[in-house]
Image (spheres, rainbow, N blue to C red):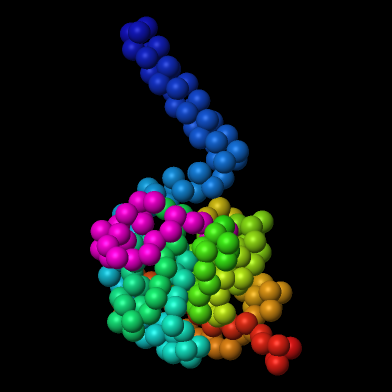
Amino acid sequence: MFWTAAGKGSRVVSYRLYAAGRSFIGRLFPMLALRRFWDNKAEHVHRQWGAWHHDFEVITECIDAVNAHSVLDVGCGSGRLFPIYSSKGLCFCGCDLSRTALKLAKSRYPAADLRAIAAEDISPKSLGQTFDLAVCNRVLQHIRPATIERAIRGISGAVSSVYINETTMEHAPRGSDYLFGHDYIALFDRVGFELVSSGWIQPGELRPGELTPQQWFLFKRLTEKTL
């Protein structure tokens, strides 16, 4: 009995030390902790939503609206949106923090240009090139308020237009540590981008009860003539 109790106590202490260690590492190396989190989620996200195409029509219309010939897919995951780009013959690059998600994308699209880059680290320098359009689909909502401006500055510096489909301030749950609402219109205005179009996608009509309505925005860099 003594040894059994001692063994249980040892396991409890070991777990607490392990949890404390993970918490410390998360605070010290936040990007490492985030990568581990999304690596663990990658396969589930792919199984759950990887075959959905409820937003393909809207994204295609936005690509046409800005006459994009190249696309930067920010937080591309397993490549759910890649069929849109391929069908239109676009040059595209997929970026994601999760290496597991990128492995899934590579297995599905071997020829795709994939980069292990977090949204906060995107810039013309890190990419080595620029694109006509950035597609940010349910990605910026996971970036903490402390680093969202850095992400927006980097992405906007690498593209001429940006499509986003993200949780907005009024729809973000309170107290969440992984889902944040941002004022995207104000954020993009600060980097010289104007809102040219917006709307709602109603996936509930296609998949009742599985996904809430989604709001999307299309931003475009202000030209010197506009300024």
Residue 55 pos. (x, y %): 38, 80
In the picture, measured across the screen, residue 200 lies left or right of residue 30, that is left
* Closer to the camera in the image, 113 or 80: 113
Residue 46 higher or lower than 171, as above or below: above
Residue 86 higher or lower than 12, as above or below: below
**What residue is rendered at 66% in x and 85% in y?**
222
Residue 106 pos. (x, y %): 30, 59
In the picture, measured across the screen, residue 227 lies left or right of residue 98, that is right
- Can residue 61 be seen here? yes
- Can residue 179 be seen here? no
Residue 137 higher or lower than 2, as above or below: below
**What residue is rendered at 39% in x and 51% in y?**
99
Quadrant (top left, top right, bottom left, bottom right) of the C terminus = bottom right
Residue 67 higher or lower than 158, as above or below: below
Residue 122 pos. (x, y %): 55, 62
In the picture, measured across the screen, residue 154 lies left or right of residue 106, that is right
Residue 43 pos. (x, y %): 31, 54
Q: Which residues are magenta?
A: 99-120
In the picture, measured across the screen, residue 32 lies left or right of residue 157, that is left
**What residue is rendered at 36% in x and 57% in y?**
102
Residue lying furthest right: 227
